[in-house]
Amino acid sequence: GTETRDCVSLTADSEDLELITAIRAGSRDAFAMLVTKYQTKVRTYCYSVLLDRNAAEDAAQEVFLKVHQRLNSFREESLFSTWLYRMAVNHCRDVFRRNKRFRAASWEQMSVSKQDAVSMATESLSQEFVFESRDLIKKLFVHLLPEHREVLCLRDVHDLSYEQIAETMNCSLDSVKGRIKRARAELLSLSRQLFSSDDKSPFMQRGEK
C-alpha cells in the first residue's frame, strides 16, 4: 500500500543521504555504491526514451557524470531518486534536441533491436493494461511520442507518484495527469490503427489506481 511504499522511500532516502555525505567527504567507494544502486533504473529509463541500446548506455554514464559534478547542488529538499530522475529526464531531452536520429521511426523502419531495447520498459506496463499481445505493445511503445514514453516510463515502469513526476518534470500535478491521460490515449489510438473498426482493440485500459 501507500504507507508501505512511503516507508520504503524514507528508508532508501536515508541510505542515499548517508552515501551522499560520504561522497562529499571524498569517498569514491560511496559513489560507486550509489551508481550500483541506481544504474539499472537510469539505464532502463534511457532505453525507454531513446530506444537505442548504445545511446542509452552512453546517456546513463553521462547522467552519473553529471550527478558526480553537481552533487553539491542537491539540497536534500526532495528525494535523491527524484533529483536523479530529473537529471536523466533533462539529459535525454538534450540528446533528442542534439540528434534527429532519435525521432520516432515509421512502422516499416521499426527494427528488432528497437523492440529489444524497450522490452524491459514495457514489462511493467501490464500493471496498467491488459494485453493480448506483448509483441504488439512493444511496437506501440516505440511509436509513442517521446514525451509520452517519458511520462509512462516514470509512472508505469518506475512507479513514481504523480507528485514525484511533477517534481521530476518541473510541472504541475494537473499537467502530469493530463500527460499520462494523453499518453495512454495514444497507446489506444496506435493499437486501433492496426485493426479495422469491426475488430476489438488488442488491449483495454484498467482504471487508474
Image: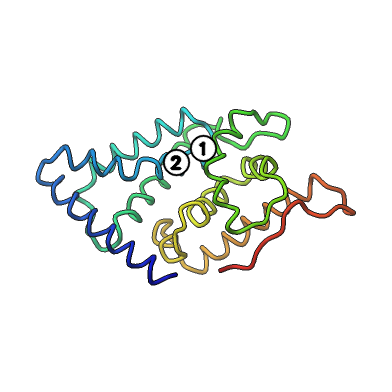
Direction from residue 124 to residue 57 in the image, left or right: left
Please give the name of the residue rendered at 45% of the width and 36% of the height, measured from the top-left corner: 95
Q: Is residue 88 above or below residue 205?
A: above
Residue bearing the label numbered 1 = 50
Please give the name of the residue rendered at 90% of the width and 54% of the height, measured from the top-left corner: 198
Direction from residue 183 to residue 52 in the image, left or right: left
Asked if the residues shown at circle 1 and circle 2 are in contact, with their CB atoms under 8 angstroms apart, the answer is yes
**Looking at the figure, which quarter contains the C terminus?**
bottom right
Residue bearing the label numbered 2 = 92
Q: Nearer the viewer, residue 79 or 174?
A: 79
Q: Is residue 126 above or below residue 50?
A: below
Q: Nearer the viewer, residue 159 or 103?
A: 159
* Amino acid marked by disc 1: Leu
Please state the horizontal and vertical placement of residue 40, each as a whole percent of the image. 39, 41
Please give the name of the residue rendered at 82% of the width and 55% of the height, measured from the top-left corner: 200
Q: Which mark is residue 111?
A: none
Please give the name of the residue rendered at 56% of the width and 39% of the height, measured from the top-left corner: 118
